[in-house]
Image (cartoon, helix red, strand yellow):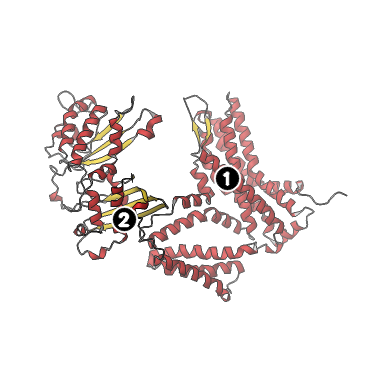
Amino acid sequence: MRSGKSYFNMALFKKTVTRWWPIWGTYLVIWFFILPFSMFVDHSLYLYNGNITDTLRGYIWFAALYSPICAMAVLSHLYWPRSANFYGTLPVKRQGIFLTQYTAGLCFTLVPNLIIFLLTSLLYVSYGSFNAGCMFGWLAVTTAETFFFYTFAILCGLFAGHVLALPVFYGVFNCVALLFSLLLNEVFREAYYGFAGFPEWVEEVIMWLTPGARFLRAGWGSVYVVIPERGDPLKFVFSEYGIWTLAVYSAVAVIMLAASYGLYKFRRTESAGDVVAVARLRPVFKYGVAVCSGFFLGYVTDAAVGGLPIWIVIWTVVGCFAAQMILDKSFRVFKKWHGALVAGLVVAAAMLVVTLDLTGFEKRVPELEDVESIEVNSFYARSDDHGASDSADWGDFTLTDRDDIEKFIDLHRALANNELGRYSGGSTGYMSINMTYHTSHGAITRAYSTSVYSEAKDEEGTVPWALERIFSDRELYWHIYGFDELETFMQGGGVPDMSYSFNCYAYGYDLSDSDEPELEYDYFKNGGNDVDITRYADIKAVFDALKEDFFAGRLGVRTLSGSGYMSTGPAGGYAVTEIRPPEVVDPKTDVSRSIHITIGPSNVHEAYVEYRRSIYINVTPTAEKTLSVIHSILPRIMEEQGLLNYEGEYYDK
């Protein structure tokens, strides 16, 4: 005898599709105007300028926002007792109802995508070409993103017992890992002196747990268009990042589909109307809300009145009771105080560990023999060269020499033991550093910002003492600027057919009354003008002179004593600050020029990353050799670039 039950019901499928037609109808109309209609209006953009693949940058939002709407529609029968009981009486197995409803909701977006694909392809053919790579690439990406986000929304919908809980769970689960990590990052910065952020592997895991951010990071930069020559057809290219993103999330979607299938099969009809439909997940909801509210509201309250650890514990307890009220749909929850007490004690213990630094995080400094290299991402300390910050203040260098590593370990140890209250005088500067140790046991990252007191520069173990050791090492600073790599490149004679540029003379003051040699040209009298030196021989001559001045201590010198000029640069996030009285500034002696050396194959694209070098350095009047060489070649260069005529008069290019 033929069974009266089935795993798919066509009548139910048709009813669901026709009932919720505004969802897929609106979706289809929107994408009709985005692709086929726009292509019909201006087909050249879509044939040659990459607009088809550019729409993928925005499609992620459609997939993420339409998916919970589709899930709410096809699962709406689960959230009211009457409809839940009615569907339970249908002559279709629960698995059949699930597969029917799931397929109907998936078709709300996949079928319109297929229609858009066919219409756009027909337009391509009508214009005499069909770009299969772009079109099938577009279809593959949209299908994978829709499949993942829709299945994710279905799973969230089966956790929920109320229709409004579905979009809330969906939004929270999509973002909770990233948002909570950002919150923890700020809390740890407050609690731990020297905390710079989570390790890269933690950030990578967090990114995988945040699907929307992962897809957006793909760019879709991982799906891009290459146009070899104008008029050639576009090529759709997947990067390795994009391929892994699509493959992993598609596999996860299959797992979520299987889990959803099982949850629907055993879901209790009586759970209709509850916030959390799965009984075993109620504690997860309760304590998850407690911890998240504790850290978030604790951080907000701390910003207003202080006392971060205490407020985190208080708001955790409050959040636990609030979550219990939501679950029970009642305010009579205080008799269930045991869970709130446990949550408060656990969070309080965690905050004690952090506040008292029981792990030894703040005092931990790697031993020299364990360190393989130090990567410095930013390093700023006050400079007495009367100029704005330059390349040595921006960091981004790596130390492998043992002596150099030892100096920065000493600086780290001094920062970890920094006692600013010991010094009565005003600070004479500021420093900040962000560095990562690469050791035999893994990576260790620290970040510090502190005032600097020059009165302690002779006291071993202090921050000023450690800074003076670094400042006085000319070889080390030659490396910090990046001149050693540049020198190696230049000793090789450059690269054939490569263009070079060298910018100099950016003034910080009005030099109209100065007797500087270059001011015989009107071009420089208002300050702020640059001259480009493009000949390799000229660059080499200036570079050799710059090196002589540098190691003679006439250029790029830093010290903690002197004029009281404090500049706080990019690493600290501040603007340059002049604290000397205006009458002390003498334009004849305080001239601040900057030299920007950019040597790179701007006309040889394949070698750009390998050979490009870019360095800024401030040049004071003490850099006699450098200025002498520049002044000797300046007239010829200005004449060649049309900055003066033979009589030495300035005219526009």
The x, y position of residue 500, in whole percent, is: 30, 30
Q: Tell which circle, 1 or 2, labels the residue nearer the N-terminal end.
A: 1
CA gap, disc 1 to disc 2?
Answer: 41 Å
Q: Choose top left, top right, bottom left or bottom right for residue 147.
A: top right
Position of 120 compared to 382: left or right? right
Position of 317 compared to 3: left or right? left
The x, y position of residue 61, in whole percent, is: 54, 46
The x, y position of residue 360, in whole percent, is: 39, 63
Which residue occupies 22% across, 42% down?
Answer: 618
Q: Is residue 295 above or below residue 371?
A: below
Which residue occupies 52% across, 26% down?
Answer: 233
- Mark 1 or 2, which is nearer the eye? 2
Q: Which mark is residue 248?
A: 1
Compare residues 359 and 144 and report the one nearer the observer. Answer: 359
Compare residues 116 and 576 and report the one nearer the observer. Answer: 576
The single residue placed furthest to the bottom in the displayed view is 335
The single residue placed furthest to the front in the displayed view is 369
Mark 1: secondary structure: helix
Q: In this view, does 27 lie above or below 637?
A: below
The C terminus - image quarter: top left
Mark 2: secondary structure: helix
Dot 1 surroundings within 10 Å: few (below 14), some, or many (20 or more)? few
- The tally of labels here is 2
Q: Can residue 653 be seen at all in this image of the molecule?
A: no
Q: What residue type is labelled 1?
A: Val
Q: In this view, does 208 lie above or below 314?
A: above
Q: Which amino acid does label 2 sit on?
A: His
**Residue annotated with mark 2:** 412
